[in-house]
Image: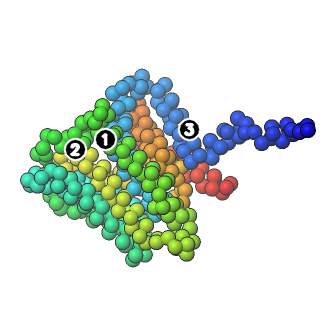
Amino acid sequence: MNTKVDTHSVAQSAPTGLDTIKSWTKHPVFYPLIGFITVFIIMVFSNDNFLTTNNLTNIARQVSINAIIAIGMTCAILLGGIDLSVGSVMALSGTVTAGLMVAGIPPEFAIFLGILLGAGFGGINGFLIAYAKMPAFIVTLATLGIARGLALIYTGGYPIAGLPKWFSIFGRGEIIGIQTPIFIMIFVYIIAYIALNHTSFGRHVYAIGGNEEASRLSGIKVPKTVMLVYIISGTTAALAGLILTSRLMSGQPNAGVAFELDAIAAVVLGGASMAGGKGAILGTLVGAMLLGVLNNGLNLAGVSPYVQNVIKGIIILVAIYVGSEKKKRA
């Protein structure tokens, strides 16, 4: 019995190189990664000091703080919300942790209380947004001022110094050959990736950002999820504050100013939609790295900080525009 094989249909069904490329372009991290590689190559050829071990390590260490804050910001933006308080919460947690250590509280307990304070502030944000039905922008703008004011009141406007020497391990030390801030960043991103991509919590976050009312009707506990997201955002801000305090070996009440803007930029450059429901945690990491490389390269080139702000603002606008155009075409 002879069986004829339709080679034409087989050829049509077999994936081609073009099909593979098209599938890559649909991955949420594809365009952020292309942007990062492009900026990286430009910086390599524009400055001889860029591609050195010390400089690349410095970039990674600086990126780690913003990248950790951006984890909580990613979750908030995926919901269709935002958290403007992260920079101030970072400063408050850092100064309180430093103050408790100097006051004689056991350092481990002081660190725990500092992170708990950040989670508590996130919980306040989450409660007001989820249960009091207040707009996330207004709530977190208010708590931005409250947290910053409390940090200044607590310290009297002065840095808190005299921390135990071993505390510097979080900001300057190494773990298994990797600088501690980078190690912590990698560890936290692994947890965030698993939570957002392989748990019901992650599915609920994406669903609420896509359509809150449909999520509620499908049985998702929307207020509970929203509250948890903002607790996570406050916790990651406090963790970043711990690292920065350790690096500076002092509690700085003015630390974290405008860090919320860098975190938002990292999320947006990572391909997330400000409307919610679209984005990837790995995209946020790439966005933070892109921002770090850009900042470092411009500093090495001697570009004025004022000009840098303009350049970053333009890049963010372009990223938002590209994202909105992709959404329209979809």
Left/right placement of residue 153 relative to residue 187 reads left
Q: Is residue 2 above or below residue 205?
A: above
Residue that mark 3 sits on: 34
> Which tag, 2 or 1, sits closer to the chain's start?
1
> Which tag, 3 or 2, sits closer to the chain's start?
3
Residue that mark 1 sits on: 181
Q: How crowded is mark 2: few (under 14 residues within 10 Å), some or many (20 or more)?
A: many
Left/right placement of residue 111 relative to residue 197 reads left
- Distance of mark 1 from mark 3, alpha carbons? 25 Å
- Distance of mark 3 from mark 2, alpha carbons? 34 Å
Q: Position of residue 239 (x, y in %)?
A: 29, 51
Measuring 46% from the left and 40% from the top, which residue is drawn there?
Answer: 290
Residue that mark 2 sits on: 246
Q: Nearer the viewer, residue 227 or 241?
A: 227
SS assignment at label 1: helix
- Using the rendered image of the protein, determine whether residue 150 is visible from the camera's viewpoint: yes
Q: Position of residue 268 (x, y in %)?
A: 49, 51
